[in-house]
Amino acid sequence: MATPAARLLAIQVVLLAGGATVLGRSFQVQVVQHNRWKGKADSLRTASDSIDARRGTIYDRNGVPLAETQEAYRVILAKDQIEDSAAVVATLARLPGLTVAKVVAEMGDRYPYFHTEFSAEDIAPLRDVPGVHFDVVHRRVYPLERLARPLLGRLDDNGRAASGLESALDTLLTGTPGQATYLRDYLGRRVRIPSSILRAPIPGRDVYLTIDNALQAIVEGELQRALQEYQAMGGDVVVLNVHTGEVLAIASFQRDPETRRLQPGMGALTATYEPGSTAKIFAAAAMLREGADTTPVFGEHGTWTYSVGGGKTRTIEDVHAEDGLVTLGETIKVSSNIAISKFALRLRPEQQFSVLRDFGFGTSPALGFPRENAGVLIRPANWDNPLY
């Protein structure tokens, strides 16, 4: 049986060995593996995330904002910095959407965070209160409401460009996000802390359109009025500056076949349609550019039937019958289908095609709007008129 001295020595050896082990492990953790364990602790206690950059404003040609980003604010409290909790609770309870009960319930958290979005005016009483901080939230608004909305487009629920010029100009309008550090509470939830910005966001660029907001309002209103008056299924209006080609106003409406309501769209840029009588102007332009024979033609009393070959004929009629000779100018004035057809037959197919292509038929408007339609211009080799 060991003597008391031997047992005491054994205990001392064990204590020394244990102490040496603890000191060795402490040195290993605090010195050798310091960066590893510090990083792991930081990852559990803090997190970093991006800060949304302010999206650029879309203006009309006169500097009137058509789409802009406004700042809203969410409230964060640092309770250890608050001097008068009762006063802060009372002030918060007066904000839109909050009550005393809601505020008191949030006060149980280490860093109370109120997700309700407030305006700058709402939070003005809290601006200089110690312990009250704000999280800035950007929201896209359209000051002129529905004006030019199909043209402007929209952002989706995640703030990403979804349509219209918001999408087409997205690379310009979108800024560069910043970066901020957040604390994690005991439940792992992230809470923004004061002075947490690591890199400030860079706002997006502003864009000025050629659109005139006043003219746009007139165009939209008059187009709707005309469509309602004549119960038309749809219509488009594009107003251009003839000297520069700038689009000053553009509007499109289509009637929903089920509800019969007019729905705004961008059919003027995205849909194809037959030019109808407006094509006469381009046929006349082709005659003049190509130096074709412009000798007046007979109006045929409003009805003309001609052979298209293969024993087939085609009949062309005019709403306003013309007797006698009709000049090229009179053809445009009275919109004569018969006369313009006779004049156009004096052109070779390649001449007609060349002029139509030069006027932009069959090519995209190249305005940069999503899903612009180039239309259809068939090559002369595929034309089915046997006379050619």
Image (tube, helix red, strand yellow):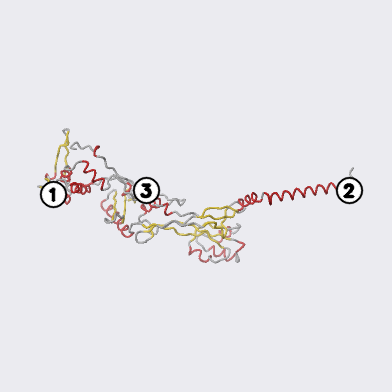
Q: Which mark is residue 133?
A: none
Q: Residue furthest top?
A: 310
Side of 127 relative to 374 (left or right): right
* Distance from Cα at disc 1 to Cα at disc 3: 43 Å
Closest to the observer, 126 or 288:
288
Residue type (three-letter) at the residue carrying disc 2: Ala
Q: Dot 1: within a 10 Å radius of its alpha carbon, few (fewer than 14), some, or many (20 or more) residues?
A: some
Residue type (three-letter) at the residue carrying disc 3: Pro
Closest to the observer, 5 or 305:
5
Q: On the image, numbered disc 2 is attached to which residue?
A: 5
Q: Residue 242: horizontal and vertical position, in percent?
A: 26, 55
Q: Residue 279: horizontal and vertical position, in percent?
A: 22, 47
Q: Residue 202: horizontal and vertical position, in percent?
A: 47, 57
Q: Which numbered disc, 2 or 1, marks the residue that appears first in the sequence? A: 2
Q: Residue 244: horizontal and vertical position, in percent?
A: 29, 56
Closest to the observer, 77 or 3:
3
Instruction: Identify the residue at image location x=35%, y=56%.
Output: 209
Q: On the image, numbered disc 1 is attached to which residue?
A: 327
Q: Dot 2: within a 10 Å radius of its alpha carbon, few (fewer than 14), some, or many (20 or more) residues?
A: few
Q: Which mark is residue 370?
A: 3
Q: Dot 3: within a 10 Å radius of its alpha carbon, few (fewer than 14), some, or many (20 or more) residues?
A: some
